[in-house]
Image (cartoon, helix red, strand yellow):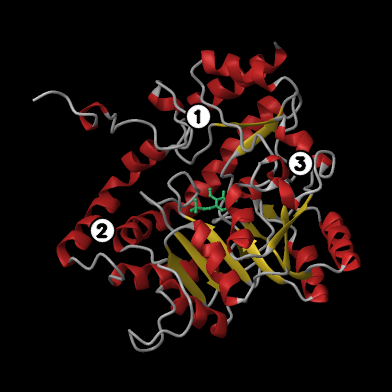
Amino acid sequence: MGKTQLDTLDTEGTPFLLPDTDVPELEFAGIKAQYAALKDSIGPRVGDVFRHGRFIMGPEIEQLEEALSTFAGVRYALGVSSGTDALIAPMMAAGIGPGDAVFLPAFTFTATAEVPLLLGATPVYVDVDHRTYNIDPADLEARIAKVKAEGKLTPRAVMPVDLFGLPADYEVLAPIADCEGLFLLADAAQSFGGSIGNTRVGALAPVTATSFFPAKPLGCYGDGGAIFTDDADLAAKLVSIRVHGQGTERYAVERVGLNARLDSLQAAVLLAKLPALEDEIAARNALADLYDDYLAEVVEAPLRVEGRVSAFAQYTIQVEDRDRVQARLNAAHIPTAIYYPKPMHYQPPYAPYGDGPGSLPVSEAIANRVLALPMHGYMRDDVAHRIGSAVRQAIAG
Ligand SMILES: Cc1ncc(COP(=O)(O)O)c(C=O)c1O
């Protein structure tokens, strides 16, 4: 029999969407290095699921939800099928829809802006801070005032994003949301494991969504996500929305919902990985410190905010001549990535909701300069030094 297309698929290859390298120790997101370290915990957990056979809503879901709510310090944690579903379900529960303005940063991953549009609401792009990459509270206030003055849309929700792992300014954003009557939904897809003071991501906002996409600080081996809240009524609605709007009886439908369940295999993987998360976040921060030593004098390195722990999903620098720096690192087999090359108002399906080029100057400028370096909790020290020094040299020319 000849080779099929499947035979030629490289199942050992770098996971979907991640930058590639042919030097194993230079892995971008450390997914293989982490598996090597944790496989003795992951294997038995996954094996349990095959043995009991409850692949949907098996016992791992409740165990994981309990472990996640304890970790985050909130009453309710709900496993869902992706970070995107973790964003859309609370917006559905809050009744966001046509005629509603949803404020969100222009510099983010598509999913943030996709969610209001899927519900018929209108995204209103807000500029970000050029050092934290997070939504700029002053610009948020200005955009809310503009929407109110125009009188066409009702300001209904705000979705701050903890970009690259750094929690947004919730101390400033929550009072703005309260004062304006906005539903505040934290897009913490990239920041689970981060914190402000003694409060962890999950408990920093009234409702928080995270993603367990494999490359995230806490990642599974497929798609997955979770929603966190202390609000019992909201949690009950989310439980229903997650399973087609189901009521207390299985075929009693109470609302329009989704198929947004997390599956038991992914929950098993997450149960095995969660105990390592705290150490991994510490290791990511130590790696960031090491990179800082090489780079902080020569480029804009990620800003450290007093009292705030980033989950360091990404270590992102800003460079003027990005193509040249990236090409040099590529030649040295060091994988890099550009998150994100365009702000939302430059993406054709999303542009009609913005005010065109020049309307979000910080987002537009940083999209041309950002470059993410390899970052994970399992990088060897010698490799980290090698990367730090190579990046410094690449910048120097
Ligand atoms: C900021 C942000 N929001 C939302 C998402 C969506 O998460 P998922 O890919 O799990 O649907 C992501 C994932 O990449 C993200 O980075």
Question: Rounded to the nearest whole Å, what is the CA distance between mark 2 and mark 3?
Answer: 42 Å
In percent of the image, x 50 and y 49: which residue is there? 217
> Does residue 63 appear anywhere in the picture?
yes
Examine the rendering and report whether any part of residue 106 can be seen: no
Could you say which disc has been placed on residue 45 in the image? 2
Q: Name the side, left or right, on which 57 lies relative to 66.
A: left
Residue at 52 percent of width and 67 percent of height:
227
Query: Can you tell which mark lies on residue 363?
Result: 3
* Residue at position x 31%, y 71% in the image: 57
x and y percent of residue 336 in the render? 55, 28
Of the residues shown, which amino acid type is indicated by label 1? Answer: Asp
Which of pointers 1 and 3 lies earlier in the amino acid sequence?
A: 3
Q: Earlier in the sequence, mark 2 or mark 3?
A: 2
State the residue lying farthest toward the left.
Answer: 1
- The secondary element bearing badge 2 is classed as helix
**Which is nearer the eye, 222 or 30?**
222
